[in-house]
Image: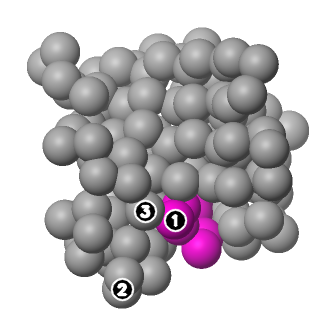
Amino acid sequence: MDRVDVREEEDDLTLILGASGVHVMQIRVRYDGWTDEVINPAGEVAPGPGSFTLIGRELTLEFGAPSARTLGFPRDYRLHLDVDDAAISRARAALLEILDCACYVIDTPEGRITS
């Protein structure tokens, strides 16, 4: 991934991951009901991952079988974020907000945090 974009609106917060000018994935929380979901490039929507890790620039999302099937993603989806430190920081903050109920392991400037 060479692009990280975070968009916050009144009703939701969305992390957009892209490569070569194409949206690869959107991870969104809808504040009404705190529902997290993932949207693939075709616009298909499925529940978000049950867990994630962000170690360095490696992001791994672990999807349930139904979500992986709907999205056309592997259950253990590994992504390399080829972006600067500011973009990693934005992605980290967005993931922690959006995937509030998911289990995680994440690197921060202060050290590694797990849920």
Single out the residue that lies furthest toward the bottom. 65
User: As rendered, which of 87 and 14 lies closer to the eye?
Assistant: 14
Give the Cα separation between the discs numbered 2 and 1: 11 Å
Vertical position of residue 53 compared to residue 85: above or below: below
Is residue 49 located in the magenta-colored stretch of the structure?
yes
CB under 8 Å between callouts 3 and 1?
yes
Q: Amino acid at mark 1?
A: Pro
Residue at position x 66%, y 29% from top? 13
Q: Secondary structure at mark 2?
A: helix
* Position in image of residue 8 (x %, y %): 68, 18
Cβ atoms at labels 2 and 1 below 8 Å apart: no
- Magenta stretch holds residue 102: no
Residue type, numbered disc 3: Ala
Secondary structure under tag 1 reads strand
SS at mark 3 in the image: strand
- Dots 2 and 3: beta carbons under 8 Å? no
Q: Which residue is mark 3?
A: 46
Q: Is residue 111 above or below residue 91?
A: below
- Residue linked to disc 1: 47
What x and y, as percent, mark residue 94?
Answer: 67, 34
Q: Which residues are magenta?
A: 47-53
Residues at marks 3 and 1, CA–CA distance in whole angstroms:
4 Å
